[in-house]
Each structure stands twice: as C-alpha cells, then as structure tokens.
Image: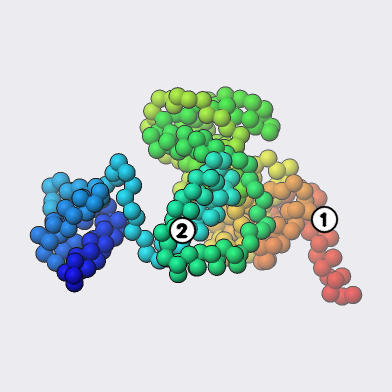
Amino acid sequence: MKTMLETSARLLKLLSLLQTHRDWPGTDLAERLGVTTRTVRRDVERLRELGYPVHALQGTPGYRLGAGASLPPLLLDDDEAVAVAVGLRTATSSSVTGIEETALRALTKLEQVLPSRLRHRVNTLQTATVRAGVAPGPQISADTLMTIANACRRHERLRFDYLSPRGGASRRHAEPYRLVHFGRHWYLVAFDVDRDDWRTFRVDRLTPRPPAGARFTPREPPFDDVAAYLAQQLSARAWPCQATVELHESADAVADRVWPGMGAVEAVDEHRCLLHLGAPTTSDLVWMITSVQTDFTLVSGPLELEGALRQQAQRCLRAIEA
C-alpha cells in the first residue's frame, strides 16, 4: 500500500514537472524525483497509459508533454486553481461575445472538482468584491478575435471592412502585427498596405473578409513597445485640443502617474521629460496636466490653455485664502 501511494505521488510530481517546462532531460527528471532514469521511463509509460501524450525528445534522452486528442486532467496547485476560477468568473462579464456562456460552463466544471477549502476561497473573494466604475466596452465576437490572431501568428495579410467615425466605411488591406486590449476596447496594430504606414484599428469597427490574404515577411515596427505606441496614438490622435508640457521630473519618476491613453511621455534627461497629450477641451487639458502632480512648463498648446491654467491657479489660491 505504501509503495502504491509513493508511486502515485511521484506520478503527480512528474506530471507537474512536465507541465512547467516544455522539454525535460531524463537525468534532470530523475534528479528532481530522487529516482533512477529507469524509474522515470516506467513512470512515463504509466502516464501514457493514463492518456497523457508524453513524447520522447529527439537526439537526447528526455521528454515533452504534448497536446493530445483529448484534454487530460490538469494538475493545479491551490493558488493556480483559485486564479483560474477567478479569471473564469471575470470572463462571464467579458466584452467578447459568446465567451460568457463558455466561461460559465468551464467554471461550473472546475468548481465541481475543487476541494471545499478552495471553493470557500473562491466564493469568499467573489462575494466580497464588487465590479464598479468600469463601463462595458463594445461587444466583439470571439471568431473575429481568433481570425485576427491567426493572421498575426501566420503572417497572413488581413482583408477587412472598416467603419471610421471620421472617414466612413472603407476596405482595408493590412499586415497584422498585434492585438492589444486597451481600456474598454480591443485594437489591431498593423501595417496598412494601401496607405504605406502603420495604423491602429478599433476591432469593434472591423469586419474581416475571409479568406486570409497572401503571407508576408514581417516588417520591423517603428516602436519597441506596442502598448506604449498605442497609448501615444490614442492620446494624440483626433483630439481637438493638444498640448506638450515639460515635466520637471524624469520619465521613470512620472510613469505611474500618467495612465494609459492620457498621453505619451518622452524622456529628455534624468531630471526632465515631455508629456504629449490631447483632450476634447482646454479644461480637460488643465486637470490632466495638473493631475501628474509635479512642476511643469507649458511648451505648446492652444492659445486658451495658458489662460485656463492661470484661472485654475487663481481658483486654488482663493480657496485657501478665503
């Protein structure tokens, strides 16, 4: 009986190791399990009999856990199981259409096999939290996201109809680079073939036209961080009021105070940086600039901005002098 329990525990540990790394040399597995390589081979055979597709590595004695025709049981520790359950609960109110019911089914299956202590942790977290202050974003079909994601992965040109609030409807041909979930929206960052430039597209305004186009050689993007590039595009594009201020702190020091979509920070030196931002009105620019909570110098902006900043300063002084 003791030998059977030890073997079962070792199989679980072996499965856990195979799930954490893609490739495992047999000697490393034997060392981690405290057994011989012959025992590892026997345990691998047992896992295969249980339906786990464990493949032998080519050229070197080792193993890899592959994807099988059916999904075998996943080995999750307590924290991983709770994280998955919470993630599925969040997905039930997702902006991706069709995924809510699927997430709910998966959550139901998971909670049926969770130990009572973990079900209690998940339910405690769920009942103690309230989702507030986040307006639902436009609904997007999971099929649309998968179509774009596959085109990104396979480097295939994407053909789609696009409805722009400024330019109206148009047919676009693009080389997709990345999907970005930013705020309440999904965006596609891609190279627009017809316009010979990089562009960002709101996915909820996009309708793919299958089949996919020809394969392409990926271009070198003009940015290192696609999320930062998108933030800069969103903050500077389409706003009637735009401004640049010099902040009297380094870019690293103010990074946490400039939220996504507010503006783009450009480093100057270790003591200064530039903040480029846009907004619907000059009043919006004022509170956005002052919310960074640091000294600044106005570099450029609409003529009314200087007066609006003075009015804000005088309003604050009157509040404490009264």
Q: Of residues 197 and 55, which is closer to you in this image?
A: 55
The quarter holding residue 299 reads bottom right
Q: Are marks 1 and 2 in contact (CB under 8 Å)?
A: no
Q: Which residue is mark 2?
A: 111
Q: Amino acid at mark 1?
A: Gly
Disc 2: CA contacts within 10 A as few (<14), some (14-19) or many (>=20): some
- Does 270 sit above or below residue 135? below
Mark 1–mark 2 Cα distance, whole angstroms, equals: 59 Å
Is residue 45 visible in the rendered image? The answer is: yes
Apparent side of residue 130 relative to residue 316 in the rendered image (left or right): left
The quarter holding residue 165 reads top right
Q: Amino acid at mark 2?
A: Glu
Q: Residue at x 51, y 25 (%)?
A: 209
Please state the horizontal and vertical placement of residue 12, each as a whole percent of the image. Answer: 26, 62
User: Upstream in the sequence, badge 1 or badge 2?
Assistant: 2
Q: Residue at x 50, y 35 (%)?
A: 143
Q: Most extreme residue toward the front, as rendered?
A: 1
Q: Of residues 216 and 112, which is closer to you in this image?
A: 112
Disc 1: CA contacts within 10 A as few (<14), some (14-19) or many (>=20): few
Is residue 148 visible in the rendered image? The answer is: no
In the picture, which quadrant includes the C terminus? bottom right
In the picture, which quadrant includes the N terminus? bottom left
Task: Give the secondary structure at mark 2.
Answer: helix
Q: Of residues 5 and 168, which is closer to you in this image?
A: 5
Please state the horizontal and vertical placement of residue 284, each as a whole percent of the image. Answer: 75, 53
Please state the horizontal and vertical placement of residue 83, each as a whole percent of the image. Answer: 46, 61
> How is the model colour-coded?
rainbow
Q: Which residue is mark 1?
A: 307
Q: Residue at x 63, y 45 (%)?
A: 137
Q: Closer to us: mark 1 or mark 2? A: 2
Apparent side of residue 139 relative to residue 291 in the rendered image (left or right): left
